[in-house]
């Protein structure tokens, strides 16, 4: 590319509004192009650019189609050259970028661009709860809450300090814009409009708070009785999910299948990371309001866990 383009790289986190952001940019693609911003088709899988993340991963992710950076960059170059409007910025979005274990690999993949990273951080107890319920409801895991949490908290990908401190250390070359997950429902869209330089009314409808609808325990238990090799992904899953919601109703916002003990383990595990986020990103992560699924659990028990997050 003769001219160095601006690259806005939205890296996630998973279960932190990524699909909503990708859907909004995908649906507003033509309007954004009028302002010189391309949400490219190259590397697009459904509405996110997950194929761009694939070559940077230390191990393959089963739901991402294989691709090479060289081929994707060539596709992008051709796509930019065929645009009717002048393109000065590209916006790529995939929560799979956080699984890149080497920041230098990510930087080197995009040396032709002026990079600005966008990250949405979510308090880990809320994130793990959301991830577990999602994987249960897509039949992607058969793990018990205890085993799921045990595996999850050993992963480096959900420690914000580990993933974002290299970006902060490289601030002379890469700019970081970090937002709390709670902002996705309100001021995020105004701020992202300012960052990428487009009128705020482009995302006006997106600014309306989304309804939190999750599958209840009965529906999840039904899915858990299915064979392990049955996965529910894509539009077909969303249609089936709606049928389950019609049949069983929805779970209460914040409901969980994690026990009080597991919640305490998670809170303690990420305590230092929450402090790092507050001190280095100037973000105080919102404490979740989980409705713990333990018999006889009192409101005071729930409040005690939440207080430990503040």
Image (spheres, helix red, strand yellow):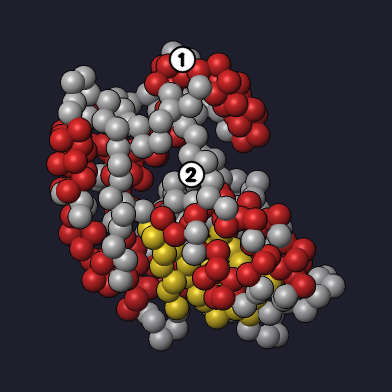
Whether residue 71 is visible to the viewer of this picture, yes or no, is no
Q: Is residue 59 above or below residue 263?
A: below
Q: Position of residue 35 (x, y in %)?
A: 72, 75
Q: Is residue 223 above or below residue 259?
A: above
Query: Which is nearer the N-term, disc 2 or disc 1?
Result: 2
Q: Nearer the viewer, residue 203 or 279?
A: 203
Q: Quadrant of residue 293?
A: top left
- Give the mark toward the camera: 2 or 1: 1
Q: Position of residue 149 (x, y in %)?
A: 26, 36
Whether residue 244 is visible to the viewer of this picture, yes or no, is yes
Q: Is residue 155 above or below residue 25?
A: above
Q: Position of residue 159 (x, y in %)?
A: 29, 56
Q: Are marks 2 and 1 in contact (CB under 8 Å)?
A: no
In the rendered image, which residue does mark 2 sit on? 61
Which residue is at 19% across, 41% downward? 303
Q: Position of residue 39 (x, y in %)?
A: 67, 63
Q: Is residue 55 left or right of residue 123?
A: right
Q: Quadrant of the N terminus?
A: bottom right
Q: Is residue 95 left or right of residue 34?
A: left
- As helix, strand or loop, the secondary structure at mark 1 comes to helix
Q: Nearer the viewer, residue 21 or 253?
A: 253
In the rendered image, which residue does mark 1 sit on? 222
Which residue is at 55% across, 16% downward? 247
Q: Is residue 150 left or right of residue 248?
A: left
Which residue is at 44% across, 51% downward? 16
- Crowding at label 2, few (<14), some or many (≥20) Cα neighbours within 10 Å? some
Q: Is residue 185 above or below residue 80?
A: above
- As helix, strand or loop, the secondary structure at mark 2 comes to loop
């Amino acid at each position: 590319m003769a001219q160095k383009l601006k690259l806005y790289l939205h890296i996630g986190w998973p279960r932190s509004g990524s699909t909503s952001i990708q859907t909004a940019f995908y649906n507003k693609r033509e309007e954004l192009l009028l302002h010189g911003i391309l949400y490219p088709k190259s590397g697009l899988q459904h509405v996110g650019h997950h194929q761009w993340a694939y070559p940077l991963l230390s191990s393959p992710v089963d739901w991402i189609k294989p691709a090479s950076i060289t081929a994707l960059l060539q596709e992008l170059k051709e796509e930019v050259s065929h645009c009717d409007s002048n393109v000065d910025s590209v916006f790529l979005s995939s929560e799979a970028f956080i699984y890149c274990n080497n920041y230098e690999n990510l930087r080197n993949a995009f040396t032709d661009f002026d990079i600005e990273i966008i990250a949405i951080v979510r308090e880990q107890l809320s994130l793990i709860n959301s991830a577990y319920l999602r994987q249960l409801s897509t039949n992607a895991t058969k793990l018990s809450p205890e085993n799921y949490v045990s595996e999850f908290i050993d992963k480096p990908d959900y420690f914000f300090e580990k993933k974002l401190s290299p970006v902060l250390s490289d601030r002379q070359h890469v700019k970081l814009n970090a937002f709390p997950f709670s902002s996705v429902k309100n001021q995020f869209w105004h701020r992202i409009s300012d960052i990428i330089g487009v009128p705020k009314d482009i995302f006006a409808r997106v600014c309306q708070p989304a309804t939190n609808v999750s599958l209840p325990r009965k529906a999840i238990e039904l899915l858990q009785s299915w064979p392990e090799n049955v996965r529910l992904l894509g539009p077909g899953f969303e249609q089936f999910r709606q049928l389950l919601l019609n049949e069983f109703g929805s779970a209460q916002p914040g409901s969980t299948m994690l026990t009080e003990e597991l919640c305490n383990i998670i809170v303690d595990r990420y305590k230092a990371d929450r402090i790092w986020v507050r001190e280095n990103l100037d973000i105080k992560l919102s404490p979740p309001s989980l409705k713990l699924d333990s018999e006889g659990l009192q409101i005071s028990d729930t409040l005690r866990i939440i207080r430990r997050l503040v």
